[in-house]
Amino acid sequence: MKKTFDFNRFGKVITNDLIRVWQNYGYSMLILMLVPAIVCFFCIVFPLVFGGEVAHIGIVGRLFMYAAASAALMVSFPAKVYGHLTDKRYGTDFLMLPASTLEKFASMILVSAVIAPAIFSVGFIAVDSILSVTGLFDGGNLIAFVKNSALMDNEYVSVNVWLLAFYNIALNMLVFLLGAIYFKRAKAALTIFSLMGVSILFSITAGPIMAKILESGHFLSFTEEDLKMWFQNHIDMAGFYINLFINGVQAFWTLVVCGLIYLRVKTLKH
């Protein structure tokens, strides 16, 4: 067991990775967390300088800022922190670390998919909340707004929006991590092009399959009345089914991406 996974070694690997995060991405992370303050500054300073009306950003604008900052994190973090593994010098240092492949892989996943998104989200929401309390942002507390939204607070279907958003960031972080350790140059751009290619391939493959299903006699055997009856009988479980489907799809793609990352880490050579 200790040859494959040892908690003491694993702790040292995580510490080493977190030091690398601070060295390579610390200031970038701070900037992303301060995006609300930066935008607020320009929305106030420019109108005051040029004699315009001060703009107070509302909920929609703040959610857009969070989405934009999250996208920047997903695209830039993996390449800056782990992209050097494809270089001979730094890649060799990584291979020489006194830890197993599983420990290195687990540390990469934990740092990229859990620790980094959590630090970013907590920092961003904290800054946003301070600006909201001081009256510089409109719409009240962002967490309270999402908590009271129709998706999270209704009698029929309840979807945990925050968990869904965090899971989405984590999954995309892993996707760009995969690209960062596979491609030697233009890591983010090639990852995006690869995602576009996979999406097109999936659409081409899924189209004929869905056509066959729709044309099958088994599918046509369900009448409109049958479907209506099924929904009436399962309305109480609608939320469970929707969450199960969403979590199932994300879990599937997470396992696929993690498997490819582990394979790359295991076969990495210089």
Image (spheres, rainbow, N blue to C red):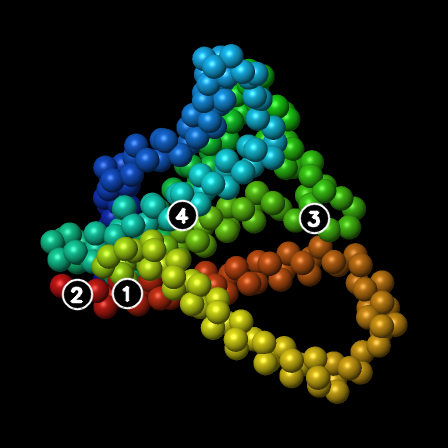
Q: Label 3 vs label 1: CA separation?
A: 38 Å
Residue that numbered label 4 is attached to: 74
| Foreground of the two, 253 or 240 | 253
Q: Label 4 vs label 2: CA separation?
A: 26 Å
Residue 246 locus on image (x, y percent): 60, 58
Q: Label 1 vs label 4: CA separation?
A: 20 Å
Q: Looking at the picture, which amino acid does disc 3 mark?
A: Ser
Residue that numbered label 1 is attached to: 264
Q: Residue at x 11, y 54 (%)?
A: 89
For the question of whether residue 96 can be seen, the reply is no
Q: For marks 1 and 4, give the one nearer the viewer.
A: 4
Q: Which of disc 2 and disc 1 is earlier in sequence?
A: 1
Q: Residue at x 74, y 58 (%)?
A: 238
Location of residue 231 with respect to 223 vertically, above or below: above
Where disc 3 sits, the SS reads loop
Asked if disc 1 and disc 2 are in contact, CB closer than 8 Å, the reply is: no
Q: Residue furthest left?
A: 89
Q: Label 4 vs label 3: CA separation?
A: 27 Å
Crowd rating for badge 1 (residues with CA inside 10 Å; few <14, some 14–19, many 20+):
some
Where disc 1 sits, the SS reads helix
Q: Looking at the picture, which amino acid does disc 2 mark?
A: Lys
Crowd rating for badge 3 (residues with CA inside 10 Å; few <14, some 14–19, many 20+):
some
Residue 42 locus on image (x, y percent): 45, 22
Q: Looking at the picture, which amino acid does disc 4 mark?
A: Met
Residue that numbered label 3 is attached to: 158
Crowd rating for badge 4 (residues with CA inside 10 Å; few <14, some 14–19, many 20+):
many
Residue 25 locus on image (x, y percent): 29, 39
Q: Looking at the picture, which amino acid does disc 1 mark?
A: Arg
**Mark sitting on residue 269:** 2
Crowd rating for badge 2 (residues with CA inside 10 Å; few <14, some 14–19, many 20+):
few
Name the quarter where the N terminus is drawn: bottom left
